[in-house]
Image (tube, helix red, strand yellow):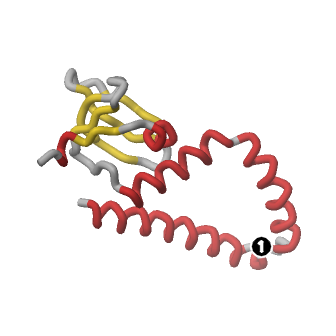
Amino acid sequence: SRQESQVLAVGQTARVIIILVTCLLCLPVLNVNIGTVVSFCGLGGLALSVLSKGVIVNLIGSLTIYLTQPFTLGDWVQTVDGEVDGWVSSMGPYHTVVMRWDRRPLYIPNSKLTRAQIVNASRMT
């Protein structure tokens, strides 16, 4: 359901934050200067953001999908252009898997799904 997916998204976000904070708190035990790590993260973050633009866009797309819930697991979805037509079988941080009618999985990057016009046939009245 929609609420379960939102709870899952919040849980995954909280897990990542807890892991990062734990790693930062363990650095002094390993005799690593936190100031050096933070300054390296600033320069490294800039380089990483330039190099991994597509990954970051897909992660933001997955967050958008989790929060807006245009579809959930098991929904029959279609795009207006006809490229996507099938059942949502899994939703991950990078891509969503739609199982086609012939049982072939279609892996769609979340950034593409946030830009596409989606018809959710499972929510028709």
List the residue tagged with mark 1. Answer: 30
- Splitting the image into 4 quarters, where does residue 4 fall? bottom left
Residue placed at 29% from the left, 66% from the top? 3
Query: Where in the figure is residue 83, as x and y percent of width and height?
Result: 36, 24
Which amino acid does the dot numbered 1 rest on?
Answer: Leu
User: In the picture provided, is 22 more to the left or to the right than 94?
Assistant: right
Residue placed at 31% from the left, 35% from the top? 98
Residue placed at 30% from the left, 49% from the top? 71
- Splitting the image into 4 quarters, where does residue 42 fall? bottom right
Q: Nearer the viewer, residue 72 or 68?
A: 68
User: In the picture provided, is 106 more to the left or to the right than 59?
Assistant: left
Looking at the image, residue 65 lies above or below residue 100: below
Looking at the image, residue 17 lies above or below residue 53: below
Dot 1: element? helix
Query: Where in the figure is residue 90, as x and y percent of width and height?
Result: 32, 44
User: In the picture provided, is 124 more to the left or to the right than 67?
Assistant: left
The residue lying furthest to the left in this view is: 125
| Quarter in which the N terminus is drawn | bottom left
Query: Where in the figure is residue 120, as x and y percent of width and height?
Result: 25, 42
